[in-house]
Image (cartoon, rainbow, N blue to C red):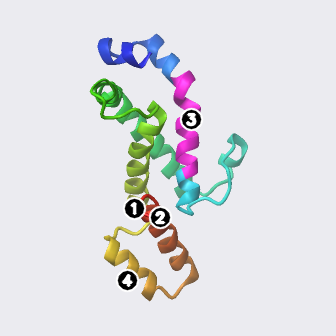
Amino acid sequence: MLEVIAQRGWTEALAQQFEDEYGVAIKRTIVLYLWRLGIVSRYLSDEIQRTIPTRELELFENTLSDVWIAILGGLVRRYRHEQLSGRTDRPFIAYLSGTIRNILITNAQHLGLLPRKSEAEMLLGLASAKKPDTQRKYVALLKFHFEERV
């Protein structure tokens, strides 16, 4: 399916097939990153989504929308090109997770759920934070930011 999308572009049938195959995995990846960043503290089933705070729900919806925009904007074609040239051998959802991560962090910073800081500023912010809530935000962001390096 990804090969057909990369070669011929999107059709209504391919979009539906793509949604059926990857839609749930994309949503779960967003929720996993929300949890790892400390923005939500539990799994977001459809029933729970109605009771979460507005900004967190807005973050989820904005991120999901931006991920679909990236996918429709050429991410599948870029993935197939990198796969054929040997630069990646990961499954598509693993390849997509980096894009999801970057979009989520940008959107969370825009909504004020995460600080907009450099690494040094984040460490300094954690060291100088007095409120436990602020400390938790910095710890979650730093853990998420440095997880691939540790």
Q: In this picture, which residue range is highlighted in magenta?
A: 19-32
User: Label 4 neighbourhood size at 10 Å, few (<14), some (14-19), many (20+)?
Assistant: few
Residue named by callout 3 = 25
Looking at the picture, how far across and down is residue 96, in whole percent? 42, 38
Q: Residue furthest right?
A: 47
Are the residues at dot 3 and dot 4 in contact (C-beta closer than 8 Å)?
no
Q: Main structural element of the magenta stretch: helix, strand or loop?
A: helix
- Check whether the beta carbons of the residues at disc 1 and disc 2 lie within 8 A of each other: yes
Question: Is residue 95 something that shows in the picture?
Answer: yes
Q: Which residue is mark 4?
A: 124
- Residue 117 vs 8, above or below: the answer is below
Residue type indicated by callout 4: Leu
Query: Mark 4 against mark 1, which lies toward the viewer?
Result: 4
Residue under label 1: 109
Residue 1's disc is: none
125 vs 16, left or right, is left
